[in-house]
Image (cartoon, rainbow, N blue to C red):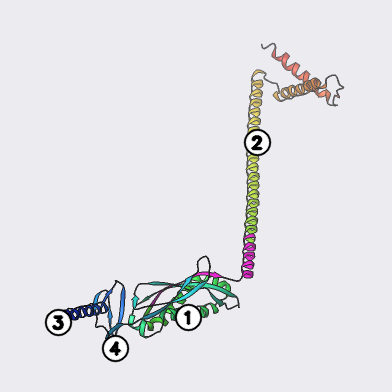
Amino acid sequence: MNLFYLLDVLGFLSVLAAFVLFVLYKGTYQVSQAEVIVIERFGKFHSLLESGIHFLIPFIDSPRTVHWTFFKQETNSKRYYSYIESSYRIDLRETAYDFPRQNVITKDNVTMEINAILYYQITDPFRAVYEINNLSLAIEKLTQTTLRDVIGSLDLDETLISREAINTKLRLRLDEATDKWGVKINRVELQEINPPHDIQVAMEKQMKAERDRRAHILEAEGLKRAQILQAEGYRQSLMERSEGEAQSQLLLAKAEAESKLLIAKSEAGAMEMLKQTMPGTDPAHYLIATKYISAFSEAMADSKGKMIVVPYEAAGFAGATTAIKEILNSKSPQQ
């Protein structure tokens, strides 16, 4: 009797211990840093469990399960596929959400593909759970519609050169729209902007033509500059040459003037000496006679046996020799 009673007690204690362990297991939650868990009591919001260890009442308190839709790129492919992840843990860290390529139409009716990535952070877990169903999917759809609206107000050229402005406009509009969901949009980036193939070919041709035009302009400007420099050099050379010739002629003129001045001074000195040595004699006749004789002698020396034409004024030559003879004769007795 006692043995059966003891076995019953041990069995009861075992079941009780197992129940207590099960209750502890179901009611104990460990929350990591930067995570929260939304707790509901009888289906109504009760509290938020932050980082640390928490004990709940099993079957009365339960965590709220949240569904998240994510996209993942296939291996060795540019295609994306979506999958739904269910969890009762809400990550409060900044999350990067990579969207698949979206077809958008610009203001000038050009269809292109744009791949965007969004960085968001949950700031209010309560509103993120109770204000919107499937927060990630809602953010994706809102981003797609906003992106199409923004690109639709721009033409192709503005879209290609205004990436930073588009990012800023998207971030402001998405942040304003998701504020009621307890989400902060920190940044939006356009990863790729892919126009149609024919547009890309036309753009490449346009860029090539623009580069060729710039090259021709630079070449023409270089040739023009070279010709200007060559003309300036030629003009400078002519100026330097003219200045050199002018300086040379000035020096020659000065030298000739000084030579004539020296000759005049020497002739004046000679005439003065003749006056002193030969009183009563006209020095001018003497000098004229000597020059006449010198010139006639040079003509005789240059003739080299050819006929010499004696000028009609040869009598002047005879008179000059007679004058020299008289001067010399008059000078001899004095010596």
**Depth-wise, is mark 4 or mark 2 nearer the camera?**
4
Observer-side mark, 2 or 3, equals 3
Left or right of residue 70, residue 234 in this image = right
Spot occupied by residue 138 in the image (x, y as percentages of width and height): 44, 81
Residue 141 has which mark? 1
- Element class at badge 4: loop
Examine the rendered structure and indicate whether residue 101 appears above or below residue 248.
Answer: below
3D distance between C-alphas at marks 4 and 3: 40 Å
Of the image marks 4 and 1, the number of the one nearer the N terminus: 4
To which residue does mark 3 refer? 5
| Boundaries of the magenta span | 184-212
According to the picture, the residue beneath numbered tag 4 turns out to be 42
Q: Residue at x 49, y 74 (%)?
A: 81
- The correct choice, above or below, for 233 with respect to 157 in the image is above
Q: Nearer the viewer, mark 4 or mark 1?
A: 4
Instruction: Say whether disc 4 or disc 2 marks the residue closer to the N-terminus.
Output: 4
User: Between marks 2 and 3, how big is the CA–CA gap?
Assistant: 154 Å
Q: Could you tell me the amino acid type at mark 4?
A: Phe
Q: Secondary structure at mark 3?
A: helix
